[in-house]
Image: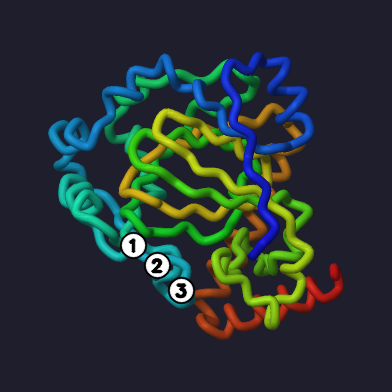
C-alpha cells in the first residue's frame, strides 16, 4: 500500500497557531470545530434541501466524467435536485453532483455559513457544494486555481487521500491536466514503479469537521456514505493567484481542445508522457 500518514485533528486553533503549524509549512489539518457556529451545520439536512430546492434542475455525473472524447467533463444527465438526493439516500451509487454553483440559484443559502477568520484571503464569490452517493469516488487531482481549500462536511463521511505538489511526478500527473489516474487503493508498482517513492496523508472527514487542503495539494476522495460538503477557497498571495490564472489557461484550454480533436489517442499520449517524467524523477 501507499505510504500515508494520518492528518492531524485539531480544535481551538488560533490564527497564529494555524499559520505557524499548517498554513506556512503547507500541511493539511482537520479542524473539528471551524463550522460549529454556522446555522447550516444543523439546518442543511436532506429534507431541508428536498423540501425547499427539490425543483432545481442539476447536472449529475458518473465515473464517465473523465473519459476522453466529446463528452469529456460533461454531465451524464440533468435531473430535479430532489430526484438526485433520493437516489443517493437509497444506497451505493457512483452518481455525484459538482460544477454547479447552487448559491447562484439560491443566494439565501449564503446566510447560513460564515467566511472563516482563521486566515485572510477567503474568496466570497466561489463557494461550491459537492454531493455524492455511497461508494462514489473523486479521481486524484488538484484544484486548478491553486487556492487553499477548506472542505466542510455536513452529511455522511468522506475518506480523503492527499499528496503535496512536489509528489506530482511520482504519482504520474497527466500533462496539461490537474489529474492522475493511479489506483489509490490498489497501486500497480509494476507499471508505475515511482509510486514506491510517494508519501502522502489520509483523512477520515466526519460531519461537522473541516479539512484544510493547502494550495496545489493532490486529493482523492471516497464517499463512505451518501452525503455532501461545502468548499471555501482562500488565497492570501497575489503571486499564487496569477499562477492559478495561468494554470487555468494552460491546462483547461489545451486539454479540452486536444480531447475534442484526438479523444482516446490524446489520453494515451498523456499516459506515456507521465511515465517518462516519472522515470526521470525517480
Q: Residue 161, how many percent across, how many down?
A: 58, 52
Residue at horizontal 65 percent and vertical 69 percent from the top? 174
Residue at horizontal 72 percent and vertical 49 percent from the top? 164
Task: Give the alpha-carbon distance from disc 3 to disc 2, as whole Å.
Answer: 8 Å
3 or 132: which is nearer to us?
3
Query: Callout 1: helix, strand or loop?
Result: loop
Give the class, few, some or many, for how many residues have Cα within 10 Å of label 2's Cα (few <14, many ≥20): some
Query: Callout 2: helix, strand or loop?
Result: helix
Query: Callout 3: helix, strand or loop?
Result: loop
Q: Nearer the viewer, mark 3 or mark 2?
A: 2
Left/right of residue 81 with respect to residue 116 in the rendered view: left
Disc 2 marks which residue? Answer: 63
Asked where in the image residue 45 lies, by quadrant, the reply is: top left
Give the class, few, some or many, for how many residues have Cα within 10 Å of label 3's Cα (few <14, many ≥20): some
Task: Give the alpha-carbon distance from disc 1 to disc 2, as whole Å.
Answer: 7 Å
Q: Nearer the viewer, mark 1 or mark 3?
A: 1
Q: Residue furthest bottom?
A: 265
219 or 72: which is nearer to us?
219
Q: Earlier in the sequence, mark 1 or mark 2?
A: 2
In the image, residue 11 sits, relative to residue 180, either above or below, namely above
Q: Residue 28, how many percent across, how many down?
A: 65, 38
Give the class, few, some or many, for how many residues have Cα within 10 Å of label 1's Cα (few <14, many ≥20): some
Left/right of residue 239 with respect to residue 35 in the rendered view: right
Task: Give the alpha-carbon distance from disc 1 to disc 3, as whole Å.
Answer: 15 Å
CB atoms of marks 1 and 2 within 8 Å: yes
CB atoms of marks 1 and 3 within 8 Å: no
Residue at horizontal 19 percent and vertical 54 percent from the top? 90
Disc 1 marks which residue? Answer: 94
Left/right of residue 13 with respect to residue 83 in the rendered view: right
Q: Earlier in the sequence, mark 1 or mark 3?
A: 3
Disc 3 marks which residue? Answer: 67
Q: Quadrant of the C terminus?
A: bottom right
Amino acid at each position: 500500500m501507499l505510504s500515508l500518514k494520518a492528518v492531524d485533528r485539531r480544535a481551538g486553533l488560533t490564527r497564529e497557531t494555524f499559520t505557524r503549524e499548517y498554513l506556512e509549512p503547507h500541511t493539511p489539518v482537520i479542524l473539528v470545530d471551524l463550522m460549529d457556529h454556522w446555522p447550516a451545520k444543523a439546518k442543511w439536512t436532506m429534507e431541508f434541501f428536498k423540501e425547499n430546492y427539490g425543483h432545481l434542475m442539476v447536472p449529475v455525473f458518473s465515473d464517465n466524467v473523465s473519459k476522453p472524447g466529446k463528452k469529456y467533463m460533461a454531465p451524464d444527465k440533468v435531473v430535479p435536485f430532489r430526484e438526485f438526493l433520493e437516489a443517493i439516500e437509497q444506497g451505493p451509487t457512483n452518481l455525484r453532483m459538482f460544477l454547479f454553483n447552487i448559491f447562484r440559484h439560491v443566494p439565501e443559502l449564503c446566510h447560513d455559513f460564515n467566511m472563516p477568520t482563521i486566515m485572510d484571503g477567503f474568496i466570497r464569490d466561489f463557494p461550491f457544494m459537492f454531493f455524492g452517493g455511497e461508494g462514489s469516488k473523486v479521481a486524484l487531482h488538484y484544484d486548478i486555481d491553486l487556492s487553499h481549500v477548506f472542505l466542510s462536511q455536513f452529511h455522511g463521511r468522506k475518506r480523503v487521500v492527499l499528496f503535496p505538489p512536489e509528489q506530482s511526478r511520482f504519482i504520474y500527473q497527466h500533462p496539461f491536466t490537474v489529474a492522475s489516474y493511479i489506483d489509490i487503493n490498489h497501486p500497480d508498482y509494476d507499471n508505475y514503479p515511482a509510486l514506491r517513492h510517494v508519501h502522502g496523508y489520509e483523512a477520515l472527514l466526519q460531519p461537522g469537521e473541516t479539512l484544510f487542503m493547502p494550495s496545489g495539494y493532490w486529493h482523492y476522495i471516497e464517499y463512505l456514505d451518501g452525503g455532501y460538503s461545502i468548499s471555501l477557497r482562500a488565497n492570501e498571495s497575489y503571486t499564487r493567484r496569477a499562477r492559478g490564472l495561468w494554470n487555468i489557461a494552460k491546462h483547461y484550454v489545451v486539454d479540452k481542445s486536444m480531447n475534442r480533436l484526438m479523444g482516446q489517442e490524446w489520453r494515451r499520449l498523456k499516459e506515456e508522457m507521465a511515465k517518462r517524467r516519472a522515470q526521470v524523477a525517480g
